[in-house]
Image (cartoon, helix red, strand yellow):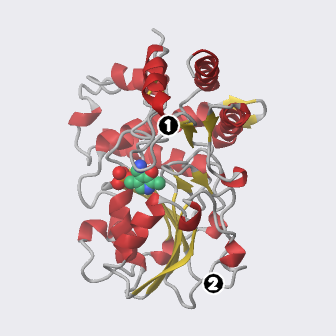
Amino acid sequence: MKRPYNFSAGPATMPVEVLEQAAAEMLDWHGCGMGVMEMSHRGQEFIAIYEQAEADLRALLAVPAHFRILFMQGGGLAQNAIVPLNLSRAGVVDFVVTGSWSQKSEREAHKYASEVNIVASSADSGFTTVPPPASWALSRGASYVHLCSNETIHGVEFQELPDLRQLGSEAPLVIDFSSHVASRSVDWSRVGLAFAGAQKNLGPAGLTIVVVREDLLGHALPVCPSAFDLRNVAEHQSMFNTPPTWGIYVAGLVFQWILRQREGALSGVAALEQRNIAKAALLYDTIDKSQLYYNKVAPHCRSRMNVPFFLRDESRNEAFLAGARAHGLLQLKGHKSVGGMRASLYNAMPLEGVQALVDYMQEFERTQA
Ligand code: PMP
């Protein structure tokens, strides 16, 4: 069966192999007589699934030993509270605002920090750029600096994480990498904490991964809920309360899928990164060469994962989307806050899917616009 190509920003398309394996194991996981949804999180079967998933995620993201990997719930938005509850020490926190998601994070932090500084913002450009790190007005003594390394709605991606020490700040860097996790490598020497909802590149909604440097644990505010105290979660191997077992299992299948990927001499995330570069180049080139479509983001900070684009004749939007659906190209409508179109090119989107999209876009421009 040929499935349509699904460009949803999240929950998003999954590798077919993973869906097939989850389906095959639905009623009986490895001959134990139970499906994964039905087993105790404390039983040996699930513990084996959990430990494999954690080890695989550590391997594929090359997470150093002095970082803990936590499997949590609540998504990216809960992390907007969990991070300041754990890291702010009720002091000063810095935010780099480059789109809707970092803006939401910044607004939530006011509840927990005594002072929230926007040290740089690209709001004036309509969130089409990343302000150069050298221009950031970093605070002295901030508890942490937060940024969203890929803005899912505006399609803005950091191509490199800032080196805060070089910029004169001792604060740990917090990154929301929800929408490009595992699409490229991470320089952990520059990161204190990273969080991501699973529902784009890793698996089903309901699972959130947190990768946190060990020395940042143990500073939660007294009001922090026990289930959200990162030290408590780490001490209980993410089993202080029942973890999202199904999400961890399916994400574990995705981790194994990622580890199996090959592209020439490259494997895992490096292989996917290579593919992601080619996929994004194909779509951006098509947009830039067209008379009908355009993208507003400065070329050096365009996201490889989320490509918002617009039709110069907005009255053709509905026709474009209807035609796309008829061509088996799903969920291309842009986020309601920005309008237009958005194609999300997560790891599970093959190059053939992007080729099908650009073929359709060119045909539409030739015949319908
Ligand atoms: N951060 C980013 C970068 C996102 O893309 C999203 C969801 N689209 C969120 C945070 C919020 O995630 P959730 O809905 O899982 O809370």
Q: Residue at x 61, y 26 (%)?
A: 354
Amino acid marked by disc 1: Met
Tell which residue pokes out farthest to the right in this image: 265
The image shows residue 327, relative to residue 216, as above or below, that is: above
Q: Are marks 1 and 2 in contact (CB under 8 Å)?
A: no
Identify the residue position indicated by label 2 in the image.
Answer: 169
The image shows residue 214, relative to residue 245, as above or below, that is: below
In the image: residue 81, left or right of residue 217: left
Q: Residue at x 48, y 11 (%)?
A: 2
Quadrant of the drawing holding the C terminus = top right
The image shows residue 283, relative to residue 127, as above or below, that is: above
Alpha carbon distance from label 1 to label 2: 38 Å
Hey, which quadrant is residue 366 in on the image? top right
x then y, percent, for residue 76: 39, 57
Tell which residue pokes out farthest to the top in this image: 1
Q: Residue at x 69, y 60 (%)?
A: 160
In the image: residue 171, left or right of residue 93: right
Which label number is shown at residue 149?
A: none
How packed is label 1: few (under 14 Cα within 10 Å), some, or many (20 or more)?
Answer: many
Amino acid marked by disc 2: Ser
Near-viewer residue (9 or 33): 9
Q: Nearer the viewer, mark 1 or mark 2?
A: 1
x then y, percent, for residue 61: 59, 51
Dot 1 or dot 2: first in sequence order is 2
Identify the residue position indicated by label 1 in the image.
Answer: 341
In the image: residue 266, left or right of residue 293: right
